[in-house]
Amino acid sequence: MKQSIEIIATAIRPAIEGEGAYLEEVTVTPAGRRSLVTVIVDSEKHLSLDEVTSLSRIVSEIVENLTELGDTPFTLEVSSPGIDRPLTLPRHFRKNIGRLVQITKSDGTTTKGRISTADENSVVVDESTIAFTEISKAVLEIEFKSLSEKEAE
């Protein structure tokens, strides 16, 4: 299983990066007589449905031609990270500047606020600078706009 993941990741990474995106994760899950191959892609900006569809076609063509995977049938799923996926890399924070985040630090304290800026070493949430080495978990908070707020935009 781990070998399959490495084979797939090595084969598709250059094509994904050639499209200006990043390979976040590859998983292979047995699902009866088939396997489910899940590929998570991301970029510096939020990917549109058309961009994910295009990446899906590219990945599909490559994976279908990997003889190293043998004859086991599989289902391929290509998607971008969901809102519930933890922020783990500096680029995840940069991509979400202006969004509401909840950060749990290594000491157990939490900070909730808007991402102002982020560089390779730290993120600024409201007025607090937090080093990435201090963060044990960071997740975006889901915000809902009222109808009157949407009309004001």
Image (cartoon, helix red, strand yellow):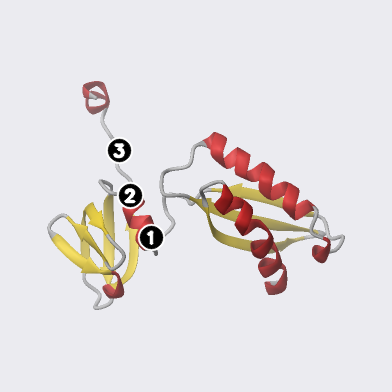
Give the mark nearest the N terminus, 3 or 2: 2
- The answer to whether residue 132 is left or right of residue 70 is left
Identity of the residue drawn at 46% across and 49% down:
43
The answer for how far apart the CA atoms under marks 2 and 1 are is: 9 Å
**Residue type, numbered disc 1:** Leu
Q: Which mark is residue 96?
A: 2
Q: Quadrant of residue 128?
A: bottom left
Observer-side mark, 3 or 2, equals 2
Q: Quadrant of residue 150?
A: top left
**Residue type, numbered disc 2:** Asn
Residue named by callout 1: 87
**Residue type, numbered disc 3:** Phe
Quarter of the image with the N terminus in it:
bottom right
Count neighbours of disc 1 (C-alpha within 10 A) and say few if under 14, some if 14 to 19, many if 20 or more: some
Count neighbours of disc 2 (C-alpha within 10 A) and say few if under 14, some if 14 to 19, many if 20 or more: many
The answer for how far apart the CA atoms under marks 3 and 2 are is: 16 Å
> Vertically, is 123 above or below 107?
above
Residue 40: x and y in percent read 56, 54
Q: Which mark is residue 144?
A: 3
